[in-house]
Amino acid sequence: MSKSAILSSSIAKKYWMAFTGLFLSLFLVGHLLGNLQLIFITGEEGKRAFNEYAFFMTHNPLIKVMSYLTYLSVLFHAIDGIFLAIQNKKARPIPYAYNNPGANSKLPARQMAVLGSVILIFIVIHMSNFWWKMKFSSEPMPLHSVMVKDPQSNQSQTLYLTHTDNFFPTSAFETTPMAEAQMEIKNETDFYNKQVNIKMGEGYKDLHSLVMTFFGQTKPGFPTNKYALFAVIGYVLAMAVMSMHLMHGFSSAFQSLGLNHKKYNKAIKTFGTAFALLIPLGFAIIPIIIYLNK
Amino acid sequence: MKLTLKIWRQKGPNDKGQMVTYPVDNISGDMSFLEMLDVLNEQLIETGDSPIAFDHDCREGICGSCSLYINGEAHGPDRAVTTCQLHMRKFHDGETIYIEPWRAKAFPVIKDLVVDRSAFDRIMAAGGFISVNTSGNTIDANTIPIPKQDADAAFEAATCIGCGACVATCKNSSAMLFVSAKVSQLSLLPQGKVEAKERVLNMVNRMDEEGFGNCTNTGACEVECPKEISLENIARMNREYFKAALSAE
Ligand code: HEM
């Protein structure tokens, strides 16, 4: 009894929606803080900060655990949500000839499954634009590099950003001049000394430039995105949908978990509304600023 | 008042059914909605048509018999009233009024506007009771001290008349407001606490089996409930269920 009760009853399904929904909300905060580096740290420093951050996020074991939890949460939340929506549709086989739901409830609350599905489509597109290219694409991702002129020879040289320690990747960060003549890049990011065939360091994938070109800027080594304006508009629209999802979802999750108390309801509602407005707004301004600064 | 009524007619459980239009005239604003339907039914009987079947009993707003989805809302546009307490002054001359039965898989239509709400009875039978013998040696109610807040909350929950407006109005046909009111009413009081765990598990289990949908916290039920049962009850049931699901043997 209690086993099926905690897994498959109508109320248990709602606990899972609420837990995963709140976890994803927490994830959004972290993700936003990371993304804000794109507009608050500018120039070479910004590029370096963001690529270091991206490296840390893809290599740190603790973050890796968190990222798998996030993937699982999205999947579980989406599958559970769609199952619930189908079940709910089935509970009323014959619809009303005339219905006036606006008289007793708000639109986002009634359209959570539609809003969620739009978010799901957005997540798939979003991950194929960045995450997929970073991790799986058959074309190697350009590495973080800078062109410098050697003052003596007056020759241009490419410097790559590398580090040598894998366990504490960010702490052992250094910029090493790796003349291409002596160096060979293996496995996309590993720098090998050609003569002695020893790994000298690991480069950073240039996610920063990928994002910047995606939203309309021009960066060396990256093809310009002709459809950047559409990418910006699509992103902003997706954030509007996210805002509506959270507008109902945030406080709803507390109710699902049984956290309803006269003393705190107003605070939860107010916080939820602020969260639903500010977090998506924070995400949305980033591509707009990138686009306007091209 | 002259009105155009669009009413769901269905001969029996297996009939397909359809909306049928009826004009009515000379409706007074002081009539209740059910009295207005009585007028229409007398017209129908006079012309040899079959009268419209609808549920009603006390006509005082306390029995929970009358239902009706009126102009897209359970018990019509007024708040905190049942259909028998809804007055025709809430409508205006020349208005078209849609009248439909409660719509839910768990509430099949029997005839016209009458639905079978016995799913609620089966949920009650699954756990909406306390198993103590109350006949014979009844003890004084005040021998057990009960905090006033608990007594008030239990009493508020107990005002639920089981009309089914929450199910009818919920976009998911969820029975959570009804079930949570019944769970709260019993488990807030000492006599009910004894069986609280099995009660909430069994009643929710039965609710799921009857084919009601899940709660999405839209809050529509609370707005349409003629007794203004609060969503707090649903949260309380969710808490109770969580504890019970984890700890019941
Ligand atoms: C980062 C992305 C997302 C966040 C932060 C999020 C957050 C939330 C939260 C907090 C809730 C309220 C849970 C409750 O009422 O107990 C919720 C509900 C819901 N979400 Fe999401 N969600 C996200 C993505 C999605 C996706 C991809 C889907 C896919 C279909 C989805 C579908 C739903 C549905 C259907 C509900 C309503 C469940 C119900 O009340 O029965 N969400 N979401």
Image (spheres, coloured by chain):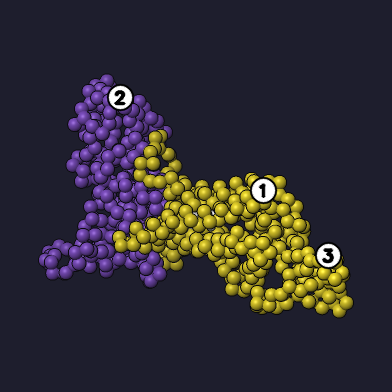
Is residue B54 depicted above or below A229 in this figure?
above
Q: Is residue B231 visible?
A: yes
Subunit of mark 2? B
**Pointer 1 with pointer 2, Cβ within 8 A:** no
User: Any idea which chain is the purple one in this picture?
Assistant: B
Subunit of mark 3? A
Which residue is drawn at the image coordinates 64% and 67% (left, top)? A49
Closer to us: A216 or B40: A216
Q: Quadrant of residue A76?
A: bottom right
Q: Which residue is mark 1?
A: A228
SS class, disc 3: strand
Would you say B52 lies left or right of A276 here?
left
Q: Quadrant of residue B17?
A: top left
Q: Which residue is mark 3?
A: A156
Q: Quadrant of residue B129?
A: bottom left
Q: Amino acid at mark 2?
A: Gly
| Image position, residue B224 (x, y; %) | 31, 45
Chain A, colour shown: yellow
Is residue A187 depicted above or below B168 in this figure?
below
Which residue is drawn at the image coordinates 32% and 36% (left, top)? B70
Q: Amino acid at mark 3?
A: Ser
- C-alpha span from label 1 to label 2: 55 Å
Callouts 2 and 3 in the same chain: no
| Image position, residue B137 (x, y; %) | 12, 66
Q: Which residue is mark 2?
A: B94
Disc nearest the viewer among 3 and 1: 3
Closer to us: A269 or A103: A269
SS class, disc 1: helix
